[in-house]
Image: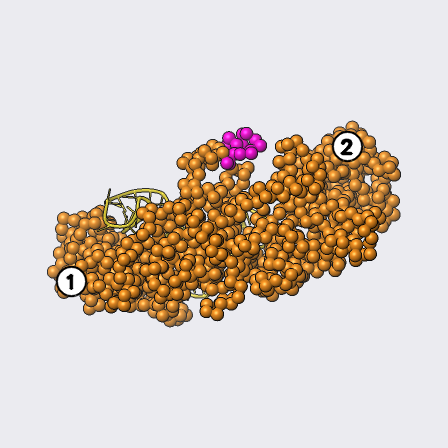
Chain colours: A orange, B yellow
Amino acid sequence: MLDKTYDPHRIEAHWYQRWEDAGWFAPRMTPDADAADGGAYCIMIPPPNVTGSLHMGHGFNNAIMDALVRYHRMCGDRTLWQPGTDHAGIATQMVVERQLEAEGKTRHDLGRHAFIDRVWNWKGESGGTITRQLRRLGSSLDWQHERFTMDEGLSNAVREVFVRLFEEGLIYRGKRLVNWDPVLHTAVSDLEVISEEESGHMWDMRYPLTNGTGHLTVSTTRPETMLGDCAVAVNPEDERYRHLIGELLELPLTGRRIPIVADEHADPEFGTGCVKITPAHDFNDHGVWTNHRDEKQIAEQPHGGLINIFTADAAIRANEPDEGDLIPAAYIGLDRIDARKRIVADLEAQGLLAGVRDHKLMVPRGDRSGAVIEPYLTDQWYVKIGPLAEPAIEAVETGRIRFVPDNWKNTYYEWMRNIQDWCISRQIWWGHRIPAWYDAEGNVYVGRSEQEVRDKHGLSADFALEQDPDVLDTWFSSALWPFSTLGWPEDTDRLKAFYPTSVLITGFDIIFFWVARMIMMGLKFMDEVPFHDVYIHGLVRDAHGDKMSKSKGNVLDPIDLIDGIELKPLVEKRTRGMMQPRLAEKIAKQTRREFPDGIPAFGTDALRFTFAALATTGRDIKFDLGRIEGYRNFCNKLWNASRYVLMNTEGEDCGGSGGELELSAADRWITARLHTTTASVREAIDGYRFDLAAQAIYEFTWSQFCDWYLELAKPVLTGEQASEAAKRGTRQTLVHTLETLLRLAHPFMPFITEEIWQKVKPLAGASDGVGGETIMLAPYPVADPAGADPDAVAEIEWVQHFILGVRRIKGEMNIPPGKTLPVLVANASDRDRRWIEMARPYLDFLAKTESVTILDDESEAPESAIALVGDMKILIPMAGLIDKDAELKRLDKGITRLRGDIERIEKKLDNPSFVDKAPAAVVQKERDRLTEQGAALAQLVAQKTKIAAL
RNA sequence: GGGUGCUUAGCUCAGUUGGCUAGAGCAUCGCCCUUACAAGGCGAGGGUCGCAGGUUCGAGCCCUGCAGCACCCACCA
């Protein structure tokens, strides 16, 4: 027997342990001759940061993946859910650097080798956190094959891919403008730069013409970059300046002369129409420079016009020996902000500042450091992306890869068709070292190892080679995830069995970072798409729709929802490590207001069911505690219903004895409903509509099984007059329905279903081939089209209407539900009479009927409150119970509703074009309804007249 | 500037090729500790489906325009 109360904590821990120890998460590698083999099904986990911890996004993402994986496993597919973690280069390195900072050290104090050791240590220390938390969620991942992006095999795959791409000319090294993070001292890709509008200023600066005829005024948001100007551009069509093209300007503060060039980039409508060109510090300017670099006046500029003025810290650099005073001494060493102030002041002093005004501008910041990103000239490695993007676009166009919801393909196309070469080198230490070596002359050699390079190029052991200090962008290794985790470049059994994978489950935020790159790399190296479907889910937001973030203090930890948390530790957790004490105070206050009693423990199943229920397509989800509370209650409901079933079946004859078996209409009805539900749930899951699946399970369990079937079963189970055969039939139906329901719900609530199933299984017998050790390997229910039972459904619906009619009268007349009443029935057909006879135990039990008297002549009836079941009237004598006025009001309400309805239908049917053009079935439906409503109306009106006359 | 999504009950959301009286959960209001469950049972109230047009016999759903919200991409120095 189950415990009296549902306690998620007690059942969850031990079941997970059991599942994992038994090896049930591992995929079957070969087709099973006995089982219906559905082929391979595989999902790759989006690898979380190895040193990270679980957040709501992971919770959501994994709840969906596990539901799919458990469903397919139960369907008999050879199912693999591949686990693993990501080294998350910059993010992880930053964490360790922050630890060092607390000790007053930098990574340079340790040196590269010791620093990397330290990161590995940190990984060892905190690396188990997230995988432990994934286990708490019940995730059925194949842990025996867990991978890490920097383990030996995956590193090998990374080098292999790099070398092959390089040999094909798809990886190259070049000096270009990159997004430079002056705090982290590394290049980052376009995707890692977040531009947001900020308040700034626009400065108008005068550049004097060398011919003494005046000056041009240029506007800029970044005056300090003027030290690197190589020209001023005007639009060739601009009448105001056309005659000045080719003239020279004196670049203030430097004494350098720069030309006026004609370029479309200059918009005559904007500002003064004159643009300063700083090719080494602005992407657009660099483009202009490219167009004009061969013109004599530009080519004669220092460095051909491409003048870098910054250090890696974005401070003004010193002059090189051969540069003379290219950079004026006054500014050297100043940080870009100080330099700006100084330059503006100096220009003003010289009368060259024409004005300054407030200006909103988009400021690019590094997504990790928050530092303002600087366009900066450096040597970097790039992937030539065009040739890779083309087949990747085609794979989606031809439907080999399908986005769910479909509209995300537009986002994908948009980016892929405008894609830029991918800067893959990072000037950090934690990551895959670029497999390239340089000799003293700077020649580059690329190979899988230094030895391979030496062998290939015939370099002797004493020939000095130095490996490129840079590491690869984290996403480079992530891009290989779908095949590298399966053993590539080896041709392993797992690779053969599970690539291409079935579906990728992820958020829209990494479509570019990850999804697109996996598609490109998969097609390139496997010659096949990495997955067939991409299911894109929304973001988990807080109850108000705000993004969860540490700084807003509105983060919910999935583990806290599972285990519960007291207010005090919750506040402590939310305010820990806050930089600003004032912010911490505000968050503490807000948390105390929102969770005055902390967060109660809801359990994993409730959390997972909530995620499933909220997983509507193409929409972010607002996580409201009310929802999870509701689904915790649902778990409780299932628990208690199961207790009831067990109470009545354990130790009883559930039909296994071979004794005579009789199935009641209720038994057949719930069985029919179970088939319908099974069909909807399967259809919903197959269509990635987890919300609909959850809803169907919830509705069946609560509103059908608990509210009606268990109640209808009671008179049979406890009734004196019910036959043994009927009791056996009901017991069998109870057990069978519950057992099937548990399997149906298992992918969404793995723990509670397993716990209960273990108790129910022995009673259910092996009739459904469910004799196994665990529900997670039991077959998923199949809907039998023959399971529909229209007769039973009609009869039970009639019973329900009868009961509802009586209850409604009681409810509205404030008669206690438990009070038994004599009930009269008039205008009963033969079928009604038959059903009344059969349903008496149900009616007595659920409608609390004291007696049910069939009137052959309605005129015999005393004054009564009335309810209709089709044409049949249910009459409850009013004497002493029912208020005349209240009953009249009730009748009026019904009459008004019916009249309105009838009016609408008549209008429709009077419209010749409706009768003419609408499908016959629709018209007939309306006609039937009119008849029905008309009869009902007549009954109510007659009743009203009768009552009113009293 | 380009794009995507959203707007349905007090709140959070369903509503799948257009067709019964637009549904659910939560919240609200009554009546109930009925022997599985008060984390419960029974009943009730609550919506001119963002606005304005159009197509259609018929529109929450399709088309056009507008408004508001959210997000993505690009960017004028």
- Residue A425 picture location, percent across and down: 71, 48
Residue A142 among magenta residues:
no
Name the residue at 23% across, 55% down: A846
User: What residue is at 81 percent from the left and 51 percent from the top?
Assistant: A461
Q: Going by the image, does A591 lie left or right of A280?
A: left
**C-alpha span from label 2 to label 1:** 103 Å
Inspect the image, locate mark 2, and give the three-letter code of the amino acid beneath it.
Answer: Gly
Q: Position of residue A170 (x, y in %)?
A: 73, 57
| Circle 1 chain | A
Q: Secondary structure at mark 2?
A: loop
Q: Which residues are magenta?
A: A573-587
Q: Main secondary structure of the magenta part?
A: helix
Residue A359 horizontal side relative to residue A621, left or right:
right
Judging depth in this view, the residue of A56 and A821 nearest the camera is A56
Q: Is residue A58 left or right of residue A362?
A: left
Give a yes or no on whether discs 2 and 1 share a subunit. Answer: yes
Horizontal arrangement in the rendering, residue A784 relative to residue A320 (left or right): left
At a point 79% along the width and 57% down the height, the residue shown is A455
Using the rendered view, name the quadrant where residue A446 is placed.
bottom right
Q: Nearer the viewer, residue A833 or A514?
A: A514
Work out whether A55 lies above or below A454.
Answer: above
* Residue at the far top in the pictured view: A349
- How far from the left and from the top, in percent, is residue A866? 20, 56
> Which chain is home to disc 2?
A
- Determine which residue is flagged by label 2: A333
Q: What type is the residue that disc 1 sits on?
A: Ile
SS under mark 1: strand
Query: Measured along the vertical axis of the image, is residue A388 above or below residue B41?
Result: below
Q: Quadrant of residue A398?
A: bottom right
Which one is nearer the viewer's eye here, A205 or A505? A505
Q: Is residue A871 visible?
A: no
